[in-house]
Amino acid sequence: MNPISPSTRRQFLARSAAGLGLSAGALRSQLTLAAALNEGHPLAPKPTHFPPKAKNLIVFFMTGGMSHVDTFDHKPKLNTDAGKKHGASKIKASQYAFKRYGQSGRMVSELFANVGDVIDEFCLIHSSFNDSGGHSAATLGMHTGSITIPLPSLGSWVSQGLGTFNTNLPSFVVFAAKEPYNAYQCWDSNFLPGYHTGVRVIPGPDPIPNLTSPVASVSRRELERLMLRDLNEEHLKAHPNDVKLRTRMTNFNTAYGLMREAPEAFDTAGETDSTLKLYGIDRADRKSFGWQCLSARRLIERGVRVVELFDVGSNSNWDAHGDMETHRGLAKKIDQPIAALVKDLKQRGMLEDTLIVGCSEFGRTPWEDKNPKGRGHHAAVFTTFLAGGGATRGLSYGASDEYGARIAENPVHVNDFHATILHLLGLEHTRLTYRYSGRDFRLTNLGGNVIKEIAG
C-alpha cells in the first residue's frame, strides 16, 4: 500500500474531524489514528462522504422472529376480534398488556417495560418488510441485503467505508454465545478484505481464546513481532497487489493488539456499583446479556467501530410456533440491558454519536399458527428500531394495518433500512461500492432509499 501523503492526511483530518470527537481515551485514539495514517494501515479511519451524525454502530439482532404485535406495535383489534376466521386460521389475541410510556405516549408491551422507560430516545419503524419468510434467507437479508447468496455483512461494509479508531482492536466485534442462522455469514466480509470480518466473542471466562502469549519475556515477544513484521513488509513489497497477504498481516497485527488491549476492555469489574446495577450484573459476571451490553459500550469507548449482539442462536429463540409465552423469558433477558445501554451512553454523552439498531429477521403472524398458542413467520410487516446517532427521537415511522398483517403506510424495505443506517454514519449507500468479479457491489444492491424523516 502506498504511504499517505501529507496533503492527503490534511484533507482527511479536515473532512472527518466532525466524526472523530473527543471523549475518554481520545488522546490514545488520536495517536493511533496518526500512526495508522503514516503507516498506511488498511483499517485507518477514512473520510465520510458528508458530515456524519453517528460515528459508531451497535446492532441488536433478536434471532428467530420477534413478534411485533406483542412488543412495539400495539393492535387492540387483535383482542377484540380474537377467534375470528382469518383465511385458514383465526385471529390470535396478544396475551401481553400494553401501556403508554414517555412524553411521546407510545404504547409498549409489558415485555419491554425498561425499554419503555427510555422509549422517547427510540425511533420505531412499524412498516419494515423483508423478502423472505424463511429464517436462513431472511437473516441473511437483514445482514447483507441479499436473501439468495452470501454477501458482505452490514458491519463489514461499515468497516470498509469508515475504518476504525483503534487499529489495536478489531473494527467489527460480534457477541454470539450461540451461532445464529447462517452462522459466520452474518458477520463475514465475503469478497471484501478479510480484516473487515467481524471478530466473534463468546461470552464467558475466555471470550476470545488464546489471548495470552506463551512467550514469557515481553522483550523477546516484542522482538519476535518486529522481526516478523519486517519480514512480512519486505514480502509485501514484492507482492503489492496481494490483498490476501495484506489481510493476513493486518489480522496478525490486530491479534497482537488484542492480546494487549482486549483483556482490559472485557474486564468490567472496575465499573462503579451504580453502573453494574444499571445493567443488572455483578463484578464476577462475564456471560450475561447485561455484561455483553456493558462490554459493547467499553469497546466503543476504546475505538471499535461496530459491535453486534445476538441474544440467542438458531435454537430456543423467538421462533414461537408453539407458545407465545416463550417471548416472556427472552424479553426478560434483554429488556433491562438494552435500556441500560441507552441510559449509560446518554449520561456519558456518547448516545448522540452512537447509533443503536435493533431488529429480527421478520415478525410474527397476527393469527394462530398450527398450534393455537403460537404465531407463524411474518415477513410482510414487522417493527425495527433505531436510537441515538442522529435518528429522530420519539418518531414512530410507517404503520401496519389494524391487525399488524400488512403495511398501511410508508413501507421500509431492508435496503431502505440499510441505506438510512449508512446515511447516519456519513456514508452515501450508492457510493459505498466494491469492485468484484467485474461489477460494483454495494450493501443495498440496486435499491435503497434513505428515510429522510428518520435520518434528517
Image: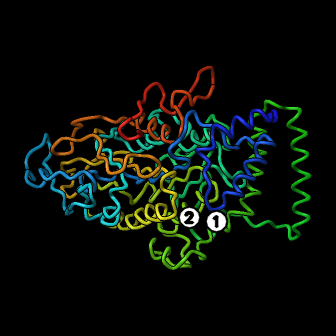
Question: In the image, is 217 to the left or to the right of 246?
Answer: right
Look at label 1 and name its amino acid: Ala
Q: Is residue 158 above or below residue 28?
A: above
Q: Looking at the rendering, in which quadrant would you find the N terminus?
A: top right
The reply to whether discs 2 and 1 touch (Cβ–Cβ < 8 Å) is yes
Image coords of residue 265 (percent x, y): 64, 65
Secondary structure category for the residue under label 2: helix
The answer to whether residue 450 of the structure is visible from this angle is yes
Q: Residue at x 30, y 34 (%)?
A: 411
Image coords of residue 99 (percent x, y): 20, 62
Q: Residue at x 48, y 37 (%)?
A: 423
Question: In the image, is 77 to the left or to the right of 181?
Answer: left
Residue named by callout 2: 295
Looking at the picture, tell me which residue is in the foreground, 85 or 361: 361
Q: Is residue 20 above or below residue 243?
A: below
Look at label 2 and name its amino acid: Ser
Image coords of residue 451 (percent x, y): 38, 35
Looking at the picture, tell me which residue is in the foreground, 101 or 283: 101
Question: In the image, is 48 to the left or to the right of 318?
Answer: right
Question: In the image, is 11 to the left or to the right of 273?
Answer: right
Residue named by callout 1: 265
Looking at the picture, tell me which residue is in the foreground, 190 or 134: 190
Give the crowd class for mark 1: few <14, some 14-19, many >=20 residues within 10 Å: some
